[in-house]
């Protein structure tokens, strides 16, 4: 058994920011991630971030990852364990970790769950044909390994991920055959959508995928028009030839570890699924467990980073070792979150948080 003061599960933007808060404090920390690198989704993101200086505005995602990783590298109080999967977390404050052929046990006084989210799938006929990708897979291929999936791609989903990946495909010389969106309005930032429209990318609003066509590989996709209440209009279908289809229809919080600890959770559609009820310090109903990032509700990476800082500060206070600037920092990071959430694009998140309650949104 190895003992730590704090264990952070997840090394994406939220987990890295939590670790940054803890880096220069007199506490022992384990940061564990199943990938073989830190940074999570940031390392795949080549677009520049919006927002304030505190939100790393004007930096690209992979640049932000480098900044945060450099801030915690070589800190004597932080142990980093990569390529490791947390198999379980238990009520006696023990976690079990599988790394290669080793089985490790750690015990901690506080846990910060920053496990992020998984991509949602879309059900349609032949959705297992080769040539059908999730947006994260295409980002990994292009931005980590320099490989384009095909020379033409049809995108499903007009949220920020779908719009940004479409633009990245165009930059890589791939023809984007169009963007298929079930809703009547574009879900992502207008600035991203406008760039695609100027480049001639067609938008198929109020449409969804009916079936994929092909024998051994994707050759075409049949799309169908939807009514305002999302029912298919059987006589209004179109065939779009494409060699690849990218699915970007949202994310679901990876909250299984929180479920194992039986913390209070609610299903909130606007936040992506089952999420924990948190207080003002991102503390769950179990006082030893904190949560931050997409596991506590799907938001932008900028929000995940602010939430990571708050969770780190909360863990320090729980250990009765509060940061010397605790009150000032908590106020500042919550203010940054409010700015992000009260933009026109944060309305959905804000509505979900008010339904969830807890923290600054408690009734």
Image: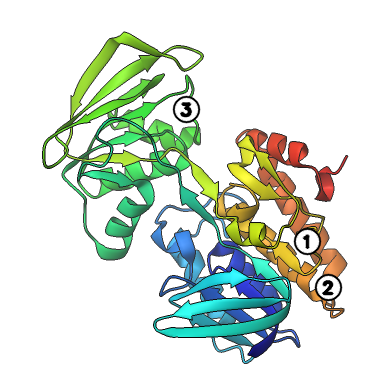
Q: Position of residue 286 (x, y in %)?
A: 79, 63
Q: Where is residue 257 in the image (x, y as percent from the top left)?
A: 61, 62
Instruction: Work out whether residue 324 or residue 292 is closer to the camera in this orientation and state it.
Output: 292
Q: Where is residue 105 in the image (x, y as percent from the top left)?
A: 59, 84
Compare marks 3 and 2 and give the one earlier in the sequence: 3
Instruction: Work out whether residue 272 or residue 189 is closer to the camera in this orientation and state it.
Output: 272
Q: Position of residue 31 (x, y in %)?
A: 58, 77
Residue 318 bears which disc, if any?
2
Compare marks 3 and 1 and give the one earlier in the sequence: 3
Determine the residue positioned at 73% across, 41% down: 353
Determine the residue positioned at 26% across, 64% down: 145
| Residue that mark 3 sits on | 186
In what element is the residue under mark 1?
loop
- Mark 3 Cα shell of 10 Å, populated few (<14), some (14-19), many (≥20): some
Q: Distance between the residues labelled 1 and 2?
A: 9 Å
Q: In this rendering, is residue 106 above or below 18? A: below
Q: Do the residues labelled 1 and 2 touch (CB within 8 Å)?
A: yes
Q: Distance between the residues labelled 3 and 2?
A: 42 Å
Compare marks 1 and 2 and give the one earlier in the sequence: 1
- The part of the image, by quadrant, that contains residue 132 is top left
């Amino acid at each position: 058994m190895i003992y730590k003061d704090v264990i952070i599960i997840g090394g994406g933007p939220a987990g890295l920011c939590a670790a940054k808060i803890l880096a220069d404090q007199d506490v022992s920390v384990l940061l564990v991630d199943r990938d073989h690198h830190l940074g999570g989704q940031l390392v795949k993101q080549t677009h520049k971030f919006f927002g304030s200086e505190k939100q790393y505005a004007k930096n690209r995602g992979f640049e932000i990852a480098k900044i945060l990783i450099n801030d915690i590298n070589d800190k004597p109080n932080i142990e980093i364990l990569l390529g490791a999967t947390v198999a379980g977390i238990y009520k006696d404050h023990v976690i079990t970790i599988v790394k290669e052929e080793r089985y490790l046990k750690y015990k901690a006084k506080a846990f910060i769950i920053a496990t992020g989210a998984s991509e949602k799938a879309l059900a349609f006929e032949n959705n297992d044909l080769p040539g059908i990708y999730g947006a994260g897979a295409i980002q990994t291929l292009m931005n980590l390994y320099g490989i384009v999936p095909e020379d033409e791609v049809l995108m499903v989903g007009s949220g920020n991920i779908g719009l940004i990946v479409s633009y990245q495909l165009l930059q890589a010389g791939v023809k984007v055959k169009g963007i298929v969106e079930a809703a009547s309005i574009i879900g992502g930032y207008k600035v991203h959508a406008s760039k695609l429209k100027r480049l001639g990318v067609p938008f198929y609003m109020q449409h969804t995928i009916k079936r994929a066509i092909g024998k051994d590989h994707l050759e075409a996709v049949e799309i169908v028009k939807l009514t305002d209440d999302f029912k298919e209009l059987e006589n209004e279908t179109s065939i779009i030839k494409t060699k690849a289809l990218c699915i970007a229809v949202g994310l679901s919080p990876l909250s299984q570890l929180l479920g194992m600890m039986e913390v209070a959770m609610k299903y909130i559609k606007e936040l992506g699924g089952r999420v924990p009820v948190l207080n003002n310090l991102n503390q769950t109903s179990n006082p030893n467990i904190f949560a931050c990032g997409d596991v506590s509700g799907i938001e932008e990476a900028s929000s995940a980073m602010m939430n990571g800082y708050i969770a780190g500060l909360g863990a320090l206070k729980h250990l009765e070792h509060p940061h010397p600037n605790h009150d000032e920092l908590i106020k500042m990071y919550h203010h940054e979150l409010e700015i992000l959430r009260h933009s026109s694009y944060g309305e959905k998140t804000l509505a979900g948080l008010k339904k969830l309650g807890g923290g600054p949104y408690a009734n």
